Image (cartoon, helix red, strand yellow):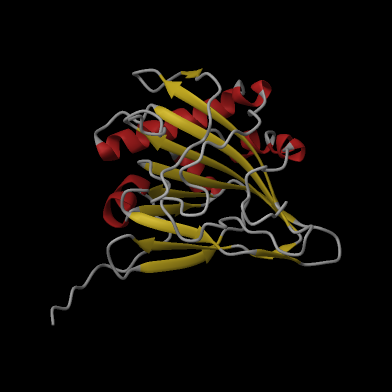
């Protein structure tokens, strides 16, 4: 029997790029995220949070739930990864091998509001992350999808990842916590896609971020439960990066 050892995983560190290259992911608190090149401060990002109050329900949940609200946008960055052009409205699509529950179907969502997409702090956030990931991969990460999510506990349980542990089929994924309100649970789990390593943690701080190399790790978040009689929720901004164009159904 061959015993393979590997350095212990860690959540965060001073050099996010080195950490992602070593273990496939990094968790950054709000202050660490703000130190990455071109990143806005958490106080600037906090001004965006109000837009999570007006998210429509996800019409595609195959478990029949109404616990997920969301909006979606697709953008293409220029070759310098400095500015973007919003792509024509398109369906979000994933192959079934990456999303066994909702893969293989075109899912249309209401678009992210133009006022949010035009916010300089959001544009700097995306541009800086694209530059970071492009250095890691040596490929320009120009094709970006943004997802606003609110997972609620109105029905008792809210499921951030009803599909379970998964990859998204892109190159890199960023999960940014916008807010947690009156919920328990929501533990994030990251696993090596081809080995035994794994780590679990709960994101608590607004504008903290999980950065994932989607080619190397799989991830999930456990269900939410309410802390009180009133409904609770967990708001996130998920940003995916891909160098080879947007995922779309294969044509014969």
Q: Is residue 137 left or right of residue 98?
A: left
Q: Farthest residue to the front: give it.
A: 252
Horizontal relation, residue 78 to residue 5: left or right: right
Q: Estimate the x, y position of residue 54 in percent, counting from the top left.
A: 76, 36
- x 58%, y 28%: residue: 121
Residue placed farthest to the bottom in the image?
1
Does residue 37 appear in this view? no
Residue 7's place in the image compared with 161, above or below, is below
Residue 25, placed above or below residue 185: above
Q: Which of 238 and 158 is in front in this view?
A: 158
State the image coordinates of residue 52 (x, y, percent, origin top left).
Answer: 71, 39
Q: In the figure, is residue 143 to the left or right of 117?
A: left
The residue drawn where x is 56% and y is 56% is: 161
Pick the quarter of the image with the N terminus.
bottom left
Q: Visible in this render: residue 240? A: yes
Instruction: Please tell me whether residue 153 is drawn above or below residue 124 in the rendered image.
Output: below
Q: Which residue is drawn at 35% across and 38% down?
A: 133
157 or 192: nearer the viewer: 157
């Amino acid at each position: 029997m061959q015993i393979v050892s590997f350095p212990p995983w860690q959540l965060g560190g001073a050099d996010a790029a080195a950490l992602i290259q070593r273990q496939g992911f990094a968790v950054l608190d709000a202050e660490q995220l703000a130190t990455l090149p071109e990143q806005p401060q958490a106080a600037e990002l906090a001004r965006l949070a109000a837009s999570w109050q007006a998210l429509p329900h996800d019409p595609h949940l195959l478990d029949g739930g109404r616990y997920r609200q969301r909006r979606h946008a697709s953008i293409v960055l220029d070759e310098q990864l400095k500015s973007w052009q919003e792509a024509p409205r398109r369906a979000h699509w994933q192959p079934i091998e990456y999303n066994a529950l909702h893969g293989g179907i075109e899912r249309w969502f209401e678009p992210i509001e133009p006022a949010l997409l035009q916010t300089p702090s959001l544009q700097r956030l995306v541009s800086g992350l694209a530059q970071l990931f492009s250095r890691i991969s040596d490929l320009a990460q120009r094709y970006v999808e943004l997802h606003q999510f609110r997972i609620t506990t109105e029905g008792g349980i809210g499921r951030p990842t009803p599909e379970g542990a998964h990859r998204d089929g892109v190159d890199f994924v960023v999960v940014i916590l916008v807010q947690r309100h009156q919920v328990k649970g929501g533990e994030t789990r990251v696993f090596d896609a081809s080995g035994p390593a794994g780590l679990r943690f709960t994101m608590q701080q607004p504008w903290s971020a999980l950065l994932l190399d989607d080619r190397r790790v799989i991830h999930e978040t456990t269900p939410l439960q309410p802390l009180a009689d009133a409904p609770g929720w967990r708001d996130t901004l998920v940003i995916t990066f891909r160098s080879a164009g947007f995922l779309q159904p294969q044509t014969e």
